[in-house]
Image (cartoon, grey):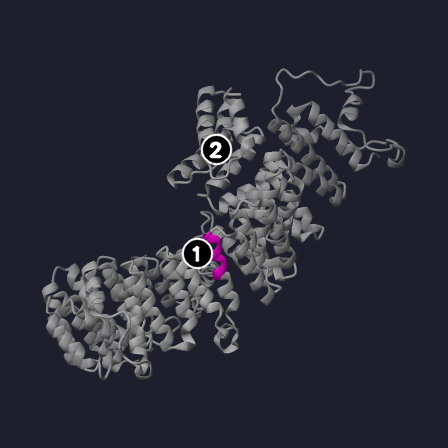
């Protein structure tokens, strides 16, 4: 009896020379030789090559051996790949039936290499790989299979479980998203609830808020019972889990602007029986939930319904188990928006004043009433009311600053804002920005208030004088008054020595932004002479300032001094690859590529000693060094760096694209290169570089028509996004048109590529020569 491998070889040969068999898998299987009483496998020797096997095929005992025929039309490389893949696939099936799964897997993998788009081939690889315990391979190919048949939600769910088991939450979320969005996912049922719940929880945990909102929007009908069909136990589990409860869903949906669905979720939380899973009735959450419901109703274009909801809240506010003050203050804001939407602005002040009479101790409500008065033009009364509040509620200082700005009270504004800043109130930066953008008011402050506050250092109680100087310096920076900036910040620096290094950094940054680089460098040198930089209580910040000084040296075009500063920083933190990497950038900007490569080599030596081989910094260094090596012809070394990075981050789109493009450019590993680039494009579908890589590998594989869409989109995106580029995309587009037989469009694209290549910041001379040859200009 012949061995399964030998029979598989015969079958492969038949398919190669009689491709019509490959078009019909059933016919091809019937054509496989029947078992016979041939000599044992040991006497048959090595399996023949396909050509040798075909030469021995006959249809009868007296017939001449079969010989290959000359085809009427030459098959393309892609067609040859498909024929070979079919042969290998059927050979694998034969081996599998013969009880040799390991040999079958080899054939299936060979088929996959030739035809990575065949779902049947990928299914076979997955099944046999898991059967043999090769789970990594099974997972990898299952991922490819899911890319081919994305609507298979059960496969996507399985992959999500595998990813989660491996600790890859982001990968699991991606597959749960695929399962959740599949049109084949049932509308209701425990499995649907499981998929959507996992998608929601993982997305929220990973801060993929848009995805989380989509998941909650799909969960909501299941929790409300609108779709029906969800058993009591599953529905109760969803409602009682804080991560999937209606209130959580409502807040996520509201956060991304899905107001109508958010309103449904809030209503569900407020309609469930008190004490039941998912209900907020009678809980501390109820007042805020009602205000939030009113907010989304207003945003959804239902202001009247929002006011009705707020009336219910305010009528029962005194009886809620939570402090109603925050909800009442928030309700005042919603009331204003709703009344404006109803063209009833004239009612705002009266309604808020009435509400203030009911809740006279509510500071937030007082602030909102003052803001309403200010909007109505009654600034004097607004200031009086807020001034009366500041003694008992200092948080009102910020609102008072806003009113004083509207009254053009420059000194009063700065006083109020400084007091708010001294209290570390939030949003003070926003008020400063509003003042800075108003040139008339900004100049009034600068003219009315000196750069250095006259309050003595030892009398600056609470840091108010320091806050005035810091704020005034910000306005002076916008007005490009460098001398006033420096004077104010130096005074602020002297008032709080514990915070002086933050002030130094602010001063360096402002002077640098004002193109006063020499003065910025002098400040950095002054800070470096301060022994406090080495004080542990102050943060041991010398390395930080050495890095800043290096950047200033680089701005001044002194790469040697920049590298010297970075070396000094590295001496204080010898195991940190950051400084070597920054030195590499300094050398590269200076045009010294050999020195940059040496620094990158040092970076990687240090990075490889750290967890995850240096993480993102190590990845950036490998990718940059790889690019430099490839550009000067050391392709194998450049490739090795990308292969190493792919081992560290197998799902990183940038690495997948870079290595895939390198292989495509060399014309090697093309099927795998295509798979890798497709993963990158799926992760970033609007990335012009990735789309160019996809078009290029398809063109290299003889799939010119399929390459057209990604290459044209890449060129369009490059133009729309204002990316100059070096002409690579347009060069590839020209090659595409040449392959499609459109000579004029090819020449137009090559011409555009040459124009970009000649004006690129870093010229690719090899590309320029190639384009000139194509255009006949050499």
The residue carrying pointer 1 sits among few (fewer than 14), some (14 to 19) or many (20 or more) residues within 10 Å by Cα, namely some
Say how many tags the image has. Answer: 2
Relative depth, front residue between 77 and 495: 495
Indicate the position of residue 694 as horizontal and vertical percent values.
52, 37
Please provide the residue range marked out in magenta. 548-556
Q: Is residue 571 above or below residue 157?
A: below
Quadrant of the rendered image containing residue 639 = top right
Q: Secondary structure at mark 1?
A: loop
Relative depth, front residue between 725 and 531: 531
Q: CA distance from mark 2 to mark 1?
A: 56 Å
The residue sitting at 59% across, 39% down in the picture is 631
The residue sitting at 40% across, 63% down in the picture is 508
| Magenta-colored segment: predominant secondary structure | helix
The numbered mark at residue 757 is 2
Mark 1 = which residue? 188
Relative depth, front residue between 465 and 455: 455
Indicate the position of residue 175 as horizontal and vertical percent values.
52, 52
Relative depth, front residue between 265 and 347: 347
Q: Is residue 563 above or below residue 102?
A: below
Lower position in the chain sequence, tag 2 or tag 1: 1
Indicate the position of residue 280 as horizontal and vertical percent values.
34, 73
Residue 143 in view: no
């Amino acid at each position: 009896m012949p061995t399964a491998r030998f029979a598989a070889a015969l079958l492969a040969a038949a398919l190669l020379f009689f491709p019509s068999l490959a078009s019909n898998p059933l016919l091809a299987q019937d054509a496989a030789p029947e078992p016979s009483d041939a000599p044992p496998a040991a006497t048959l020797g090595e399996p023949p090559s396909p050509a040798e096997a075909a030469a021995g095929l006959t249809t009868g005992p007296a017939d001449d051996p079969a010989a290959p025929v000359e085809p009427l039309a030459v098959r393309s490389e892609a067609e040859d790949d498909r024929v070979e893949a079919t042969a290998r696939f059927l050979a694998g099936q034969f081996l599998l039936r013969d009880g040799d799964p390991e040999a079958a897997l080899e054939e299936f993998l060979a088929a996959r290499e030739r035809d990575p788009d065949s779902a049947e081939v990928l299914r076979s690889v997955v099944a046999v790989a898991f059967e043999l315990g090769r789970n990594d391979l099974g997972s990898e190919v299952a991922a490819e299979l899911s890319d081919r048949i994305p609507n298979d939600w059960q496969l996507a769910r399985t992959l999500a479980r595998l990813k989660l088991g491996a600790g890859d939450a982001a990968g699991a979320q991606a597959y749960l998203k695929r399962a959740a969005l599949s049109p084949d996912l049932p509308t209701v049922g425990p499995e649907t609830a499981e998929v959507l719940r996992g998608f929601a929880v993982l997305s929220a945990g990973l801060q993929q808020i848009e995805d989380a909102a989509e998941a909650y929007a799909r969960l909501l009908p299941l929790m409300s019972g609108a779709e029906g069909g969800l058993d009591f136990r599953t529905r109760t589990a969803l409602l009682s889990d804080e991560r999937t409860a209606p209130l959580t869903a409502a807040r996520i949906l509201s956060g991304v602007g899905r107001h109508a669905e958010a309103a449904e979720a809030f209503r569900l939380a407020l309609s469930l029986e008190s004490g039941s899973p998912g209900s907020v009735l009678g809980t501390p959450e109820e007042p805020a939930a009602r205000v939030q419901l009113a907010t989304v109703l207003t945003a959804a274009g239902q202001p009247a319904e929002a006011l009705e909801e707020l009336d219910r809240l305010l009528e029962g506010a005194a009886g809620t188990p939570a402090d109603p003050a925050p909800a009442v203050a928030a309700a005042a804001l919603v009331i204003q928006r709703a009344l404006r939407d109803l063209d009833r602005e004239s009612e705002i002040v009266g309604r808020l004043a009435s509400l203030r009479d009911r809740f006279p101790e509510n500071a937030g409500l007082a602030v909102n009433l003052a803001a309403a008065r200010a909007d109505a033009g009654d600034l004097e009364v607004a200031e009086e009311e807020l001034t009366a509040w500041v003694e008992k509620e200092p948080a009102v200082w910020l609102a008072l600053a806003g009113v004083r700005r509207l009254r053009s009270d420059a000194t009063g504004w700065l006083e109020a804002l400084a007091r708010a800043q001294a209290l570390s109130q939030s949003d003070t930066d926003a008020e400063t920005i509003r003042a800075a953008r108003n040139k008339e008011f900004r100049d009034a402050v600068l003219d009315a208030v000196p750069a250095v506050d006259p309050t003595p250092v030892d009398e600056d109680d609470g840091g108010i004088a320091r806050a005035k100087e810091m704020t005034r310096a910000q306005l002076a920076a916008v007005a490009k008054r460098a001398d006033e900036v420096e004077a104010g910040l130096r005074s602020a620096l002297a008032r709080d020595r514990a915070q002086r290094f933050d002030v130094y950094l602010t001063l360096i940054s402002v002077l640098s932004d004002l193109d006063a680089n020499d003065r910025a460098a002098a400040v950095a040198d002054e800070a470096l002479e301060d022994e406090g930089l080495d004080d542990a209580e102050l943060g041991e910040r010398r390395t930080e300032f050495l890095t800043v000084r290096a950047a200033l040296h680089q701005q001044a075009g002194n790469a040697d001094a920049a590298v010297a500063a970075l070396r000094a920083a590295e001496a204080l933190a010898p195991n940190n690859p950051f400084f070597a990497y920054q030195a590499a950038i300094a050398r590269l900007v200076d045009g010294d590529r050999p020195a940059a490569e040496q620094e990158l080599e040092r970076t990687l030596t240090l990075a490889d000693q750290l967890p995850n081989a240096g993480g993102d910094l190590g990845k950036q260094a490998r990718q940059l060094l790889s690019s430099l090596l490839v550009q000067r012809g050391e392709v194998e070394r450049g490739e090795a760096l990308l292969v190493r990075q792919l081992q560290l981050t197998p799902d990183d789109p940038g690495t997948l694209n870079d290595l895939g493009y390198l292989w495509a450019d060399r014309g090697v590993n093309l099927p795998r290169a295509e798979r890798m680039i497709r993963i990158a494009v799926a992760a970033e579908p609007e990335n012009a570089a990735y789309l160019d890589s996809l078009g290029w590998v398809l063109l290299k594989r003889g799939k010119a028509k399929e390459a057209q869409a990604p290459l044209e989109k890449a060129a369009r995106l490059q133009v729309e996004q204002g990316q100059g580029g070096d002409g690579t995309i347009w060069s590839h587009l020209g090659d595409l048109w040449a392959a499609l037989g459109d000579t004029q469009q090819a020449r137009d694209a090559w011409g555009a590529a040459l124009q970009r290549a000649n004006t690129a910041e870093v010229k690719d001379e090899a590309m320029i020569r190639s384009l000139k040859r194509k255009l006949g200009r050499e």
